[in-house]
Amino acid sequence: MFSLNESLVYYLYPRYITAGKGIECLYELIRSQMGADPLNGDVYLFFNKKRDLVKILHWDTDGFILDFQRFDTTV
């Protein structure tokens, strides 16, 4: 099970993404745009332009974990 904790290293992607981007596209953004290795166990965060959606990509021992959270902006 994946849990966010202080022992992990976190990186924020510096540009906005579209909500439809999946694991393969985010993997390529990390490698080509950030110059990082997505397989190193670090956590990568991506936001959409309205900042009401975050995608979190993380390599675990069995493969990639892609979590996303849409924030309620009506409150």
Image (cartoon, grey):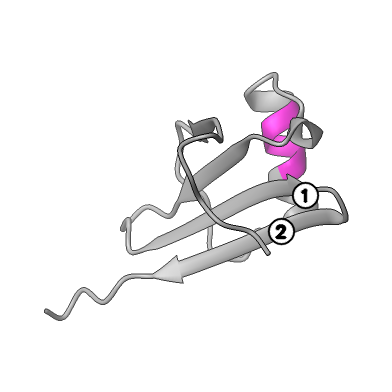
Residue 47 vs residue 44, the one in the foreground: 44
Residue holding disc 1: 60
Q: Which residue appears at 68% of the width and 64% of the height? A: 1
* Label 1, label 2: how far apart the Cα atoms are: 7 Å
Q: Residue 71 placed where, x, y %? A: 32, 70
Q: Residue 57 placed where, x, y %? A: 64, 50
- Mark 1 closeness class: few <14, some 14–19, many ≥20 residues within 10 Å: some
Residue 22 showing in the rendered view: no
Does residue 63 lie above or below 75 as drawn? above
Nearer mark to the viewer, of 1 and 2:
1
In terms of secondary structure, what is the magenta stretch mainly?
A: helix
Image quadrant occupied by the C terminus:
bottom left
In the image: residue 31, left or right of residue 18: right
Q: Which residue appears at 53% of the width and 34% of the height? A: 7
Residue 64 showing in the rendered view: yes
In the image: residue 55, left or right of residue 59: left
In this picture, which residue range is highlighted in magenta? 27-31
Q: Which residue appears at 53% of the width and 66% of the height? A: 68
Q: Residue 18: within the magenta?
A: no
Question: CB of mark 1 within 8 Å of CB of mark 2?
Answer: yes
Which secondary structure, mark 1? strand
Residue holding disc 2: 65
